[in-house]
Amino acid sequence: MTELGLQAVPVKLVFFAAARELSGCSESEINLSTPTTAKKLFSEVLNKLPELQKIEKNVMVAINQVYIDDDTNQVSLRAGDEVAFIPPISGG
Amino acid sequence: MADNESGFTHIDLTLSELSVAEVTQRLTSPKCGAISLFVGTTRDMFEGMTVVSLEYEAYEAMACKEMRKLSDEARSQYPVENIIIIHRLGQVAVTEASIIVGVSAVHRAEAIAATAFIMDCIKARVPVWKKEVYSDGSKSWKENKECEWRSK
């Protein structure tokens, strides 16, 4: 049963580094509820990809290549959005 | 690159070896008395283990966006002319450069400060990852200490 105003939209998930190794893929399509939060959308993905549990505490979410700095802030997803799971970085 | 009164910003990701001479030449401007460069090179040891090889990967589109954002921030804080950031991807041999950050400015204080600022921001925000392979066969995804979401 969906809450009032809640819908599911298809998004493209992209995985890098440790997240890719755990999920076994670099891209995946998934339906996620919206509106949502980074925290909530990660747990929805965990239902499909429980291996990602390992990085749950140390991952940042980016939507359309913008970091979601506050994982409790409400965000809206639209069909075709790109959602990335960003493990701790080591560039530079 | 959009040129404005403050010069250009050039961001790049490349599989090729980085050239300090080329970056220096591009940064040069008759308005500037200072060119500051930072070259990040790869080390052969990590916590007593010998690094046999290392490889960089990036969320390329987002990495370029973040580097542009942080360059804009640097410009808002320091009066600099040209900025170049080039990050190497793929396999990088130990001692080779993995990144060059270059800034030209009228005076050295802002060139040096902006270079340091840019490097600090890159370490904290740009989605690039390094995987090291050690002589005992083990592998590890490195985590910058500047990364707020690193494993503690």
Image (cartoon, coloured by chain):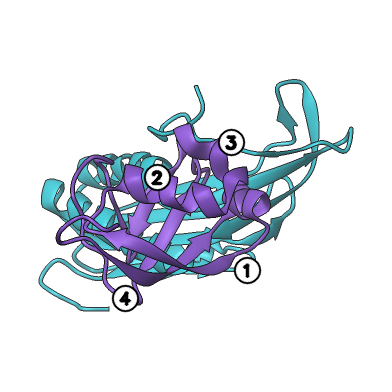
Q: Report in which chain the residue with disc 3 lies.
A: A
Q: Chain of mark 1?
A: B
Q: Which residue is mark 2?
A: A60
- Identified by mark 4, the residue type is Ala
Mark earlier in primary sequence (4, 2): 2
Left or right of residue B49, residue B60 in this image = left
Distance, label 4 to label 2, CA atoms, is: 21 Å
Identify the chain drawn in purple.
A
Disc 4 packing (10 Å; few <14; some 14–19; many ≥20): few
At a point 38% along the width and 32% down the height, the residue shown is: B148
Q: Are marks 4 and 2 on the same chain?
A: yes
Point 55% across, 38% down: residue:
A53
Sequence-wise first label, 2 or 3: 3
Quote the CA–CA distance across marks 1 and 3.
30 Å
Q: Quadrant of residue B42?
A: top right
Gap in Å between the C-alphas at discs 2 and 3?
A: 13 Å
Q: For the residue labelled by badge 2, is the local secondary structure a helix, a strand or a loop?
A: strand
The residue mark sitting in front, 4 or 2, is 4
Q: Where's residue A49, x and y in %?
A: 58, 52
**Dot label at residue B121:** none
Q: Secondary structure at mark 3?
A: helix
Q: Residue furthest right?
A: B136
Q: How many marks?
A: 4
Chain letter corresponding to the colour cyan: B
Which residue type carries mark 3? Lys
Q: Tell me residue A17's x, y (percent).
A: 60, 52
Query: Which numbered dot is residue B15?
Result: 1
